[in-house]
Each structure stands twice: as C-alpha cells, then as structure tokens.
Image: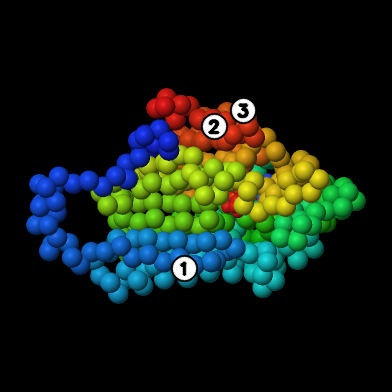
Amino acid sequence: MARLHTIMFLGHGSMSQRTCCSGLVALSLLLLWPLNTLAEWYQQEAAIMGTSINVELWHDDAEQGRALTQSVMDEMQRIDDLMSTYKPTSELSYINAHAADGPVAVSTELLSLIIRALDYSVITDGAFDITYASAGQYYDYRKGKKPTDLQLEEALPAINYRHVKIDPQRSTIEFLQDGVRIDLGGIAKGYAVDRSMEILRLAGVENAIVSAGGDSRVIGKHLDRPWNVGIRNPRDRHSIVSMIPLENAAISTSGDYERYFEEDGIRYHHILNPGTGKSPHEVYSSSIIGSVATDTDALSTSVFVLGVQRGLQLINTLPDTEAVIIDNQGQMHYSAGLARIQ
Ligand code: ADP
Ligand code: MG
C-alpha cells in the first residue's frame, strides 16, 4: 500500500535535509562503510516523450546498475514509439488515421491502456477524455497556434469517449464518428513510469525513483529516508511550495505552466475541457498521490479539469488517493486524508 508521510511545507522550518551527525553516529557509519562499499546510486537522465526522464536506483553491481538505468530509458522510448501522436509510424497514429473507416486491430498493450483511459472518462463524468484531441490537434503551443472558431465548432461533436468502440474479444478499436482523434498524453507517461518500475522490481531493485516530467513513482527509500518529491510553485519555476515524502507510491502533477502561450491576457495551455475544447482556468495545478503512476497521471489531468470542489469530491471517494490543488489565487486545497494530517 502507498505510504504517505507528513507533508513538509517549505518555509515552515521542517526541512529534513539537514545532515548533521554526532561523533558517535559518524564513527558507526565509518565502521559500516566497508560492508557497503559495493552498493551505490546509479542515475540517468534523458529527453524522451517530449519531457525529461530521470531514474535513480540503488544497486550493488555497477554493470547491472547502469544497465538497469538504460533499460528504463529503452522502455520509455519503446512506449513513445508505440503511443506518440507526433510519430506517423506509431500504432496510435495508425489508429487515428484508420479507425473512423472501420475496426482496426490493436496490440493488447495499447488496447488495455485505452480501456483504462475510457474507464477514467466514466468515473470523471467525461472530464478525462482521450478524444479531447479531436480539438487538441489544432493547438500548437510552441507556435502560439489555436483552432479557429469554425474548427472548434466542427471538432466539438467529435469529442466524446462514447465514440470509441472497443471489441476486447477481437482486440479492435473503431471510431463511430468522423473527425475523432485520440491522444494518450494524459496517461501514457504515468504508464511508462509504472512499466519501468516493474522492470526494476523484477530485476530485484528495492530502492528507486523513476520520473517522466510531472509523473513519478518511488519504491523503498532514499538513504534510509522516504523519497521527497516537490510540488512546484506554479508561478515560479525555481521554487517548491511543498515537499511530499513518499515510500512505495506515485505522484503526478498537472499544471497550466508546462506548455502554453498567452494571447490577449488569456493563457492557452495543454489541458483542455472536453466540453469546450478550451483550457480551464480554475486551478494552476493539481497533484495526485496514489499507488501507481498510471492512475495518478490520469487523475491529475482529470482533477485539473474538474476544479477544486468536484476534483476533491472525486478524490475523496477513491481509496489510497490524495490530492493537493493550487487554485488560481495561489490557495492550496487538500483531500480529506491530507487535511487530517495538517
Ligand atoms: P504533462 O503532459 O505535462 O505530464 P498532464 O499529465 O496533465 O501533463 O497531461 C496533459 C496532457 O493530457 C496534454 O498534453 C494532452 O495530451 C492530454 N489532455 C489534455 N486535456 C485532456 C483531457 N481533458 N482528458 C485527457 N487527456 C487530456
Ligand atoms: Mg496527467
């Protein structure tokens, strides 16, 4: 089960990073040292899936430690090759090009993730919807491009997860309407983090962190303490508003500051309300803590769209799941399980 330790708020004097040893502790560390010389942290960083991937793991074999950090990168690359809408050769691009013409055969892996995404559409009452891309395809945040009124008007009827028909027996997918496009950007990074962590666990790793942009999962500890994952100040890239200590848990943050442009005082960012095809503005960021990153990823995007009240209402019904939401006034809101330990 996911374990969440008391949250530490920066600026409130409880930072646990201070390293001070009494002489006695230092001596005993010294005595232990020869036993531990072989075990070390292995770390690797790379840019994959349009984001920064980071892995750190504790291993007692240098060659294996390095090979395992590389296998995480390989797994991230494999999933990106399968699911990216930016790659015309990906399986997902093939679906988008052909599923409106009739059922298309899909790999079990991709189908399972699409089914999980559709389940999230049901529990979020459509706030999480991979067909958002029917309108989302017209945005280009780097170039400051958004859909015209006409494009948006035509795309809106295509946004509806019910247009996606799955046949699990035949392993096929079909779009029941023209103009439907799907994109797994709101769940695929979390999935890739979970898959990578599974590779590490099967290889016997007991202490590790894997992150893909705002989605992280940890197992075990970091130097005998829980891992600390920061929640960024949504209006200042360089500052952290709170540190979340975690063991065997996942955390995802969705924010309006990752990919966006501004025009006439309006921020157009990469999370869209499926009802309007436009970016919601009620919150700056939503962070979800849970057991696995596939779920926290889908939920962080969902809660961003749902807003403070409906978002917390949903999270409070889910077991082992907590939320920290920063609204558009910079105010922080907590799910019931976190509010209890404040
Ligand atoms: P990040 O990609 O920065 O980790 P998120 O996990 O919040 O951020 O996911 C944002 C991505 O989710 C967008 O880039 C887009 O691909 C996808 N997305 C946007 N709006 C929705 C939505 N309403 N439902 C499902 N996916 C969405
Ligand atoms: Mg997400």
3 or 2: tag closer to the N-terminus: 3
Q: In the image, is 55 to the left or to the right of 109?
A: left
Quickly name the residue at label 2: 332
Q: Which residue is mark 1?
A: 73
Choose the circle earlier in sequence order: 1 or 3.
1
Count of numbered badges drawn on the protein: 3
- The answer to whether mark 2 is within 8 Å of ligand 1 is no
Three-letter amino acid code at the position of disc 2? Met
Identify the residue shown where x is 84% and y is 49%: 152
Q: In the rendered view of the protein, which quadrant contains the N terminus?
A: top left
Could you give the CA–CA distance between mark 1 and mark 3, rounded to whole angstroms?
38 Å
With 144 as the anchor, is 21 left or right in this view?
left
- Disc 3: CA contacts within 10 A as few (<14), some (14-19) or many (>=20): few
Q: Which type of secondary structure does the marked residue at label 3 adopt?
A: helix
Looking at the image, do the residues carrying marks 3 and 2 touch, with CB atoms under 8 Å apart? no
| Mark 3 CB near ligand 1 (8 Å cut) | no
Q: Position of residue 134 (x, y in %)?
A: 77, 54
Secondary element type, mark 1: helix
The kind of residue on which mark 3 rests is: Gln
Residue 304 located left or right of residue 267: left
Local crowd size for mark 2, using a 10 Å CA cut-off: few (<14), some (14–19), many (≥20): some
Q: Mark 2 or 1 closer to N-term?
A: 1
Three-letter amino acid code of the residue under disc 1? Met
Q: Position of residue 218 (x, y in %)?
A: 39, 51
